[in-house]
Image: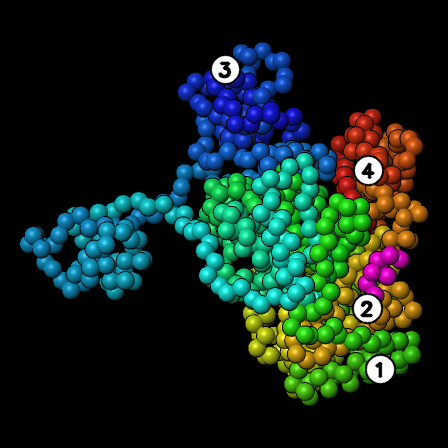
Amino acid sequence: MLAKDSTRDLTHGTRVRVLIPLPLASAYDYLVPDSMSAQLGTFVVVPLGNREVIGVIWGEAESNFEEKKLKVISEKIDLAPMSDEMIRLIDWTANYTMSKPGAVLRMAMSVPSVFAASPTNIAYVISKDLRDGSARVTEARKRVLSALTDGVPRKMAELTKSAKVSPSVIRVMSELKFLSAVTVERDQKITDIEPTGDAPILSDAQMAAATALGRAVIKSAKQAKTRSNVLVLDGVTGSGKTETYFEAISATIKKGRQVLVLLPEIALTTQWLSRFETRFGSPPLEWHSELSNSTRRSRWLAANSGVIHVFVGARSALYLPFSNLGLIIVDEEHDASFKQEDGVIYNARDMAVVRGRAAGVPVILATATPSLETIFNIQNGRYQKLSLPERHGGASLPKVFVVDMKAESLEPDNYISAELETRVADTFEARQQSMLFLNRRGYAPLTLCRNCGHRITCSHCTAWLVEHRLKGKLECHHCGSSRFPPKECPNCSARGSLVPVGPGVERLAEEVVKKFPSARVEIMTSDTIRSPSTASCFINRMQKSEIDILIGTQIVAKGHHFPNLTLVGVVDADLGLSGGDLRASERVYQTLQQVAGRAGRADREGSVILQTYQPENPIIQAMVSGDRDHFLDLEGKAREPYEMPPYGRLAALIISGENMSRVEETVNGIGKARPTMPGLQVLGPAEAPLSMLRGRHRRRFLIKARLGVRIQPVIQSWLSRSRIQSGVRVQIDIDPYSFM
């Protein structure tokens, strides 16, 4: 537990706990040395074994070790201490997800260079005037002096460019002592954001929602840190949710506080950044894996120092060390990408709510398709709902049409119905844009031998290899391994017998090009969008109508605004409905609603074609009727009798290892020690649908509990009674989203 007074100095002789960013179960005890003033959250260097590591003072020591056995803190790092809010978030995340606290801390210390001395560069200033006659004054030297007359040190590259001289001129002037070389910090300077853009004209509904958001920001300083202040901005696609919550950002900036905006995909940042800069006159700070080390260092330090700015990023941005946080926004809150499945398994949306409560600041959840968990919290009064029921600017929602594929007779290797083909042709003739959605990367999901029926599978996973014809490879979408397509069947050795089965986006594009040879066709998937810059290129070309038909996976389904896009065709609306995923129906509906929402967002009417083999499915019917709430009500009623989330709780244990017998032995032992108590049920063990992943055999337990049951202590006690074999890993997934 944290001390109540986290600002109290810890002087010499004080025993403290130091948490180290390693997957360790607890903090270690150390002594504060002479001449060191520290407090909770202070970054320090401590000895660990035969090396020194960086950690954070996490509280006063709780152990009774003899003082002479304790090691002394080596050094205090000159950084602002980690905030109480951040410490509480790390502790809460570790306790809730049953992760090692040090592993969670590592996410908050993800830029090692910030704990080292500031990197430096050599720069030059004038040390002596050439006019004393001790050296010849050439025209080149005059230009160098002119460039340095303001007294600001300039690096070699900058100086040679501004003075239009070669580096040798600078070096000679330095050797002659007319220039002095000085060191300057290499960190990028980040200035406060100063809104200069014009606020847009908002509709009545937008203004009402913006006013409520502004009130939440203003009163947040008085908000008790034990209560959540969560507002759900529930608006149809194209209703202007972004412009609405921009008003909350503006109010936060005026208060001199920091803002964090979480987006599920880097592809969404391009248009968002453009709209932000139009509104505020300057860009926000991005946070994602594509940033250079120096940029990450500068932005981490900006968050830590409390510099007033807006940060936008993926889920990892949640663990930046903000010291002056005033608002958190989670855009597309329903998106499954907010759930991290490796390492520390957590949901960034839920942890954002925790961080908002710890900091006493409002959290805005924005979406057109709220998750059932969010709906449940609204109904129970935990969250406040703000509605935007209409599209902005008079645009209407697209009309949805269904094509029953059972009645279609398609040519071999064709996947586009006659109705969809006609609509695409009409849209192309009208010089408008179409989007074809198929949530399946590559050319074909399966390669089959037509001679013996053999399927090409991954050697590391129980999964088929997906043909990627543009790369000329077969790839596993689970472990990333790849191989060149074999020339003969690995099973029967028949040559020329291997055929692709089923469509991916590449195969769909092949069909589109054949049917519309004069159309400009592009594919947008995670294979073609590898960075924010490539995403920006795609987005700009769509906005400029340089693409006629866009074919994509889920990456095109959310957040994008293409004014000239009037037709959306969903090639396989049933994809994702099969399997044992609890949230399958909810996810499919969210995806279809989001992708449909890309059509007709400006002054032209939009339409959506759903190709399906299940036209009677409630999901399809809800899409046609536009009655989202009715579908969510049906989905909730289907789960409630079985106490499935959000009406109950789930946790998963995934037991994996390279040695099958050790995995089975561990699973049997865990199974024998399973807990029995009212309100809790343990299902399994069972072979995971992906029974092998990355060379590791996998088994699963599923724990189902009533809402009142504290599931973490039960699991902790259960595993403490079980023996885990060497080489076997037990992963705990609280509130699982993946059931594979």
Residue 335 in percent (x, y) is at: 72, 56
Q: Give the distance between the C-alpha atoms of the residues marked 4 and 2, in whole angstroms.
A: 48 Å
Across and down, in percent, residue 70 comes to 55, 16
At horizontal 83% and vertical 26% (from top left) the residue drawn is: 721
**Which of the two labelled residues, at mark 4 and mark 2, occupies the earlier sequence position?**
2
Q: In the image, which is nearer the foreground, mark 1 or mark 4? A: 1
Q: Alpha carbon of mark 3 to alpha carbon of mark 2: how far? A: 67 Å
Q: CA distance from mark 4 to mark 3?
A: 47 Å
- Is 629 part of what is drawn in magenta? yes
In the rendered structure, the answer to whether residue 733 lies left or right of residue 24 reads right
- Disc 1 target residue: 411
What residue appears at the point 24 percent right and 62 percent down from the top-left corner? 163
Q: Residue furthest left?
A: 133
User: For mark 2, what is the residue?
Assistant: 626
Under mark 2, the amino acid is Gly
Q: Of label 4 and label 3, which has the lower sequence position?
A: 3
Could you tell me which residue is drawn at 89 percent across and 81 percent down?
409
Q: Disc 4, disc 2: CB below 8 Å?
A: no
Mark 3 residue type:
Gly
- Asked if the residue under mark 3 is in contact with the one under mark 4, i.e. CB atoms within 8 Å, the reply is no
Relative to residue 413, is residue 637 depicted above or below?
A: above
- What residue would you read off at disc 3? 13
Q: Identify the residue shown where x is 45% and y is 32%.
A: 77
Front of the two marks 4 and 2? 2
Q: Nearer the viewer, mark 4 or mark 3?
A: 3
Q: Main secondary structure of the magenta part?
A: helix
